[in-house]
Amino acid sequence: MAEIKKILCFCGSGLGTSFLMEMNAKKALNNLGITGVEVEHTTIDDIVPGEADLFICGADLLHNAEKAIGMSNMVSMEEMTEKLKEAFGL
């Protein structure tokens, strides 16, 4: 995968779940020692292809974005960490 500099987390409304995924992604990146990555959240209606290097969403929304991580449990730090390790090739 290409270098990841921006991650965009999204959910149906762009409020609670996407914000929790953003916070967990930031924590996971910090715990993995990964710096220089911008992480934001939004609603599914506002995602634009190419807006981010990696998208994170619930597994049910995975078909809405390319270069995406689908979360089975959107608030799981363990799953977030494992999937980001894989995305960053760690």
Image (tube, rainbow, N blue to C red):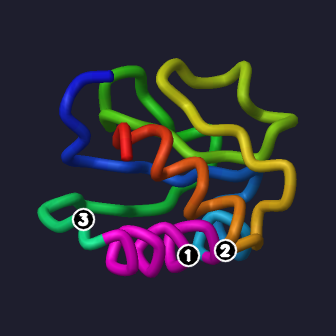
Is 30 situated above or below 47? below
Query: What kind of element bears circle 3?
Result: loop
Which amino acid is tagged 2?
Met
Give how far apart the Cα atoms at labels 3 and 1 are. Answer: 13 Å
* Residue 23 in magenta stretch: yes
Which amino acid is tagged 3?
Ile
What residue occupies the far left of the structure in this picture?
Answer: 36
Mark 1 crowdedness (10 Å alpha carbons): few <14, some 14-19, many ≥20: many
Q: Quadrant of residue 65?
A: top right
Give how far apart the Cα atoms at labels 2 and 1 are. Answer: 6 Å
Q: Are marks 2 and 1 in contact (CB under 8 Å)?
A: yes
| Horizontal side, residue 87 vs residue 74: left or right | left
Q: Nearer the viewer, residue 52 or 72?
A: 72
Dot label at residue 56? none
Q: Earlier in the sequence, mark 2 or mark 1?
A: 1
Q: Nearer the viewer, residue 18 or 71?
A: 71
Q: Position of residue 77 (x, y in %)?
A: 66, 74
* Residue 49 in magenta stretch: no
Segment tinted magenta in the rendering: 20-32
| Horizontal side, residue 47 vs residue 16: left or right | left
Q: Quadrant of the N terminus?
A: top left
Query: What kind of element bears circle 1?
Result: helix
Which amino acid is tagged 1?
Asn
Mark 3 crowdedness (10 Å alpha carbons): few <14, some 14-19, many ≥20: few
Q: Residue at x 23, y 24 (%)?
A: 2
Query: What kind of element bears circle 2?
Result: helix
Dot label at residue 34? 3
Is 32 situated above or below 38? below
Q: Residue at x 12, y 62 (%)?
A: 36
